[in-house]
Image: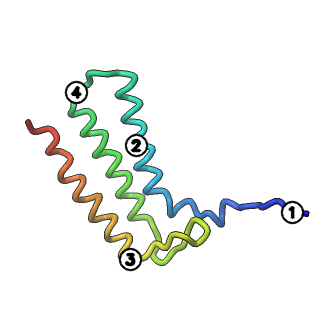
Amino acid sequence: MLEPISVSLASLNLATLAPMLIAIAGGLIILIIDLIKGNLDKSLYVMLTILILFVNFGSVLGLNVNERGFFDVILIDGIAIVSQLLILAASMLFIPLALTS
């Protein structure tokens, strides 16, 4: 009748999803740290966020141009890489403002 669908990890090309997965995992780690140990200083959360953004910045720099991923749904072109780098750089500049006030 119906044949089982086999999906290889090579066709997913998970490297194109790495920046998004790093941001999600980093946010979850910060939330778990806050749940386990409350009343930590705000500077710890700011530094963890900046560290995660630096790792994310490096993963975006490692992406290849004109690469398709996730069953050819995502196209990583030059504009996508530049815009992700711009958003990450702006985030790294503005997040330390959370330490003021």
Q: Residue 94, how many percent across, how many down?
A: 18, 51
Q: Is residue 78 above or below residue 28?
A: below
Q: Is residue 17 above or below residue 96?
A: below
The CA distance from mark 1 to mark 2 is 40 Å
Crowd band around label 4 with a 10 angstrom C-alpha radius: few (<14), some (14–19), many (20+):
few
For the residue labelled by badge 3, is the local secondary structure a helix, a strand or a loop? helix
Mark nearest the camera among 1 and 2 is 1
Q: Are marks 3 and 2 in contact (CB under 8 Å)?
A: no
The first of marks 3 and 2 along the sequence is: 2
Instruction: Tell me the CA gap for discs 1 and 3.
Output: 41 Å
32, above or below 87, in the image: above
Q: Amino acid at mark 2?
A: Gly
Mark 3 or mark 4: name the one nearer the start of the chain: 4
**Which label sits in the foreground, 1 or 3?**
1
Q: Which residue is mark 2?
A: 26
Does residue 44 appear left or right of residue 68 in this picture?
Answer: left
- Residue bearing mark 1: 2
